[in-house]
Amino acid sequence: MTTSIRATGTERELLETMLDQARADLIDTVRGLSETDARSRLVPSLTTPIALIKHAAFAERMWFQRTLGRLTDDDCDGPLWAHGGFEVGDDETVTEVIAEFERASARARSIAARIPLDETREHPHKGVVVSLRWIYMFMTAEFARHAGHGDILREQIEAR
């Protein structure tokens, strides 16, 4: 799913569009892979195509739900600390993990919609103070970086 590119608009519209594009690009790296291929470990870390999506859901919860929305760990819609989200259960499918990420992204949009770009929050564990603008830019960079990882992993999988 590729979002339409927005080249004009308010700063907020542009930030939201770029983050949504990065989300879609990341999902595209795993969509259509078999369950076995999505779990292929081609590097020593826990990084697999499906784990990149699982980690992205974790990041959505950490930055938008926990930090920006000030929700407690229990009020977030999934776990926050297990391996940075890179651990995927044997019973979780690609479709389920994509849906988890999409739910976390939708909740992130809902939380962010009512908060001004300059409003700040303190990260609950790191102590750093960030604005919503910073979160948008950080998450876009994070997901774009992981989409690049996913592209490389997929290229290696498809070359086998």
Image (cartoon, rainbow, N blue to C red):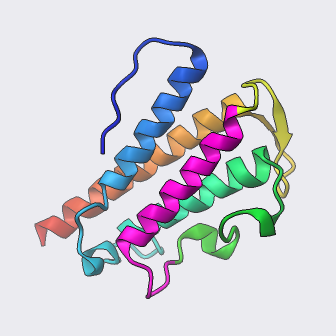
Q: Is residue 73 left or right of residue 10?
A: right
Please say if 55 is above or below 45. Answer: above
Q: Is residue 134 left or right of residue 72?
A: left
- Residue situated furthest bottom in the rendering: 90
Residue 85, by quadrant, is: bottom right
Residue 57, by quadrant, is: bottom right
Please say if 75 is above or below 124. Answer: below
Q: Is residue 71 left or right of residue 38?
A: right
Residue 45 pos. (x, y %): 47, 73
Query: Residue at horizontal 43%, vertical 71%?
Result: 96
Which of the two residues, 120 or 40, is positioned nearer the viewer here? 120
Query: Residue at horizontal 75%, vertical 25%?
Result: 116
Residue 99, by quadrant, is: bottom left
Which of the two residues, 98 or 154, is positioned nearer the viewer here? 98
Q: Quadrant of the C terminus?
A: bottom left
Q: Main secondary structure of the magenta part?
A: helix
Q: Range of the magenta residues?
A: 88-113
Is 93 colored magenta in this rendering? yes
